[in-house]
Amino acid sequence: MGGPCLIERRQGRMLFAVILTCSVGVQLANGQTRPSQRKQAATPSPQASPLSSPVSPTIDAAQVAADALLLSQRLRSLPERLISDKSLTDLEQQVSRLKQTISDKTQQTEAAIQSGAIFTELQQSSLDWEALGKEARNLSEALTKQSSALESEVQSLKNEESRWHVTNQEVKAQVSLPELLELTDKIVADIGAALTSTEERRSRIVALQQSMATQLSIIATETEQLSKARAESQRSLLEPDSLPLWKVQFGSIHESSVARVLRSSYKQDIARLRDFIYAKRTPLIVVAFLTILALAFFLRLTRTTVEKVQTQTHPSLIQRPFSLALLVFMLAMMPLLYDAPNSAIGLVNLIGIIPVTRLLKPRLTKTYQKLLLGLIASVLLFPFVKLFQFPTWLKRDLLALFTLAVIVLFVWLGRQAVRIGGNEERGPGLTLIGLVGGSFLLLIALFANVFGYVGLSDLLTQASLTSAYRAVILFTVFVVGGLFISSVLRAKTGEKITADRTDPERLRRRLTFTLGITAFFLWIHSTLKLFAIREQVYAAISRALNYQIHIGSASFAISNIVAFVLTLLAGYLVASVTRAILGEAILPRMRLARGLPNAIATVTHYVLLVLIFIFALAAAGVELSKFTILTGALGVGLGFGLQNVVNNFVSGLILLFERPVRVGDILEIKGVGGEVTKIGFRSSTVHAFDGSDLIIPNATLISEPVTNWTLTGTQRKIVLKIHVGYENDPTQVRDILSATAATHPQVLEYPKPIALFLGFGDSALNFEVSFWAPRPGVVPELRSEVALSIAAALSEAGIKVSVPQRSLHITGLDQHNNLEQLINDEHSEVPSSESGKLAAKKS
């Protein structure tokens, strides 16, 4: 950095020269001849511009001082804008370490390929080369960025050097300006020093780029060779790679490939784990941050469980925040484990024991708890068996005994589970199916080891155990997620006291189903990777989906149909969940008019369905321009054949927007009353008071008279009529009626109960008491309870309810005899219970 140092040493002298040159330049400009003035007018003076800007070939004398000052400032800031010596040295050290790592890894890989390494070892080597390739590409990109910046700086400095060199030559031609000549000489020297330093850095960066290009070429070559070796090893999995187990007992045959795959290097695993953490440092930081957030959320939820969230069915779920946070960690780590080394997978599996045993184990029967513990022990013991330094034949014996012990344990526990829980639900049944499949794969791995297929045995054993363990983790996520959703929805429903009828069970089912489907496909994706058949399976599926079906002149691929169906199914699921969340979790919390949340959620559902249908058509490859013809034909069909359907659909939209009928309203239509539980696409559902469900077309609710008892409010008026005898005081009776009705806890205070004296009847004093119920559902019970309370209050006050009386006047003896005969005849024809009444009437 000779240029910047020279500038620092001569800073005071330069400032003096700049000031002097400015004055000289001004005098020189004033003494120019007319041709020079015309030339200056034709060619304007160059303005100060960045180094990368285009410059004029020379600088006017009046502008030399200003441009020199600006250029000096830029040259002083040059070290801040360019890469420093320390950073450049660090890059050189990184490139050197990477070269050494690639060289060592190349020797290991070539030795493994030449010795016929087994598939699992080649798979780990592929992960190592992927990590090295990513590191090399990142380093190469950093070098390219620095090289571009240096190249731009060098070009700018060359332009400035040429410009100031021409200016310096013109100043030398004018011997009367020694100060200006000294200034231009200094600027030219400073530019030359800065250019030399920058070109030196660029040369070092270019050398590093060439070295990295060589290393990237080596990585590409080794990756290609390793890919071919993996494909060959995968094809040869069904071919023996060692002698049968009974032929190598107590033998001294050295099998390098088998010994390598059966011997796990502790140092190499640690190195792979360290490289994995370095390569995935940013995603791992995100995972750690999510885990901390989840822990804070669950800790806060634990403190508010008793007060707000009533989880009495599963109280231990919220009381284990650390296990829940670790479960979130396991779920977030799933995408990172697809290309992770075995050491990283083993570490994550070790951490996963805590949430599995704390959250899933208490919800299983004793037999399934033993199965869970046996699986965890098997997953943890398998790497340790491979880690022990034993001879190859003894290591194979240990692995065979280990596999046999796992099979016996699972079969024995599975038989107990079948015998004890024969009537269990679907979950344990699926567990037993998986248990049978896993035991079968382990049995194949045992025979493969015995007959010399060591690579196949190692792959099947490791993949089966790891896949089963991941299934347990995802099943834990499914169970805990379902319980958490149920608890939260139950708590929110319990807090809500309105007349609107919610359906949290529907939301719970849809969210749980979505969670289960997601967990299942995650398990399928990871399992295919573990068994090393994911690429082949996906390629086969792709070929099957791309198969063309020809019908006449038209042809279409199966993928179009599958894409259309899957888009519709996934879209319908998303639309349903969105509708449920809006209508039952979000909108009810807002201060909206009654029935408006359901209307917004339903309209949103319809809009999403239309958009999903359009997306499904696009996914199927249907041109939307041609779809307009189909839309026109569909419109004609709607006009003629689907009038009722369209009428009901439009009527449903009217119901949603005008809201004369809302979900939760109490209706009476054609003499049948009930509660509206659903306003659907074509019809609405009314749950009648007798327990039946009425399916009513939407057009009927619009076109026919409907009594809505809850349109303007949920309060219902109840009227009771009371008759007492003439011997009672009317004022006392009125006060007793109003006071008794007002004392009932469910009777509304406003409007307050009213008791009225209606007048004099034929044989009684007529009263009426009216009061209001808070909602229609309590009307029958409240009417009965208030009536019983009034009867008790009247009886306590000595007030008797009047009984209608009739007086019979007889004029003449013949009529009296005829009446007596008539009574006797009636007495002979009626039961004994009625004869007493007739005798009383006769008397």
Image (cartoon, grey):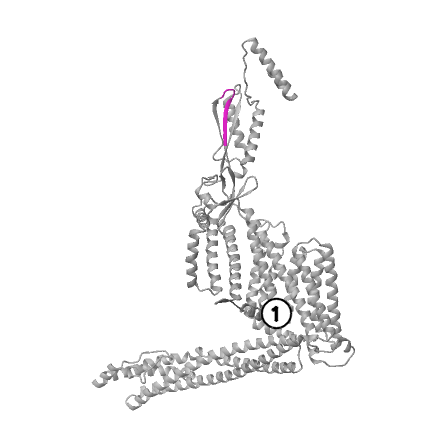
**Residue 83 visible in this rendered orientation of the protein:** no
Stretch in magenta: 761-770
| Residue 209 percent coordinates (x, y) | 50, 82
The quadrant the N terminus occupies is bottom left
- Answer above or below: position of 649 versus 759: below
| Residue 88 percent coordinates (x, y) | 50, 81
Residue drawn at x 57%, y 22% is: 798
Front in this rendered view, residue 158 or 145:
145
- Residue 579 as seen in the image, left or right of residue 128: left
Residue drawn at x 63%, y 78% is: 232
Residue with the mark numbered 1: 529
Q: Secondary structure at mark 1?
A: helix
The quadrant the C terminus occupies is top right
| Residue 207 percent coordinates (x, y) | 50, 85
Q: Is residue 156 magenta?
A: no
Task: Specify the principal SS of the magenta part.
Answer: strand
Task: Count the numbered circles shown.
Answer: 1
- Residue 535 as seen in the image, left or right of residue 149: right
Name the residue type under label 1: Lys
Q: Residues within 10 Å of mark 1 (few under 14, many from 20)?
A: some
| Residue 841 percent coordinates (x, y) | 60, 16
Q: Point out the residue furthest to the right here.
A: 250
Q: Quadrant of residue 363?
A: bottom right
Front in this rendered view, residue 229 or 838:
838
